[in-house]
Amino acid sequence: NIVGLDRNVDDSDLDKLPFLKCIVKETLRLHPPFPLLHHETAEDCVVGGYSVPQGSRVMINVFAIGRDAKAWKDADTFRPSRFMPGEGEATGVDFKGGCFAFLPFGSGRRSCPGMALGLYSLELIVAQLAHGFSWALPDGMKPSDLDMDDIFGFTAPRATRLCVVPTPRLVCRFITDLDSTCQTTSFVSVGGI
């Protein structure tokens, strides 16, 4: 129990949630924000036995790289533990582009300039949503009914929308200012993290 039910997750809690970081990495491995990185060659080169002349436009398929069975054990399986420090096979893999099997934000000078802000925001929002709500599928729906296919293109959205039902589980306090006096009303629901 890192946070408890009397407050929301804040940025000081994120370093105490290593598995959350693993979930974010695994999600970005399987579903990169931009599945194709566009580049232009600066000089003639040979890639995989093919001659690529200077000035050629090339696309790096980050979507395929993240699902490459040569680079990832159980490549099509969502398994966040692969990134768990000291335990998983991808322990040292980071977002900076040093590992060419994991490029959700590109690499080098052409990597995403908003990577740090994007990761911080994503981790904080996911932590707050997971902590603040219990999540369930709509009535009668089973996990096996979910369509997890993607549509491939400039971005890779899900083929069908995911519908889930959130149930609040935090102790929330709503403060209303009435005629210079504060009136506090509490809303309590059950649950825990």
Image (tube, grey):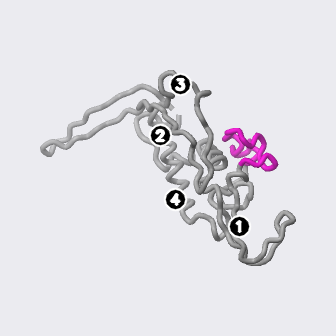
Q: With 71 as the anchor, is 107 left or right in this view?
A: left
Most extreme residue toward the left is 179
Which residue is under mark 4?
A: 117
Most extreme residue toward the top is 140
Mark drawn on residue 58? 1
Picture layout, residue 128 above or below residue 165: below
**Residue 177, how many percent across, how many down?**
19, 43
Task: Name the residue: 41% across, 39% down.
Answer: 7
For marks 3 and 4, give the CA distance.
Answer: 35 Å
Picture layout, residue 152 above or below residue 57: above
Which residue is under mark 3?
A: 141
Q: Does the magenta portion include 76?
A: yes
Task: Name the residue: 54% across, 39% down.
Answer: 160
Q: Earlier in the sequence, mark 1 or mark 3?
A: 1
Q: Does the magenta portion include 69?
A: yes
Within-10-Å neighbours for mark 4: few <14, some 14–19, many 20+:
few
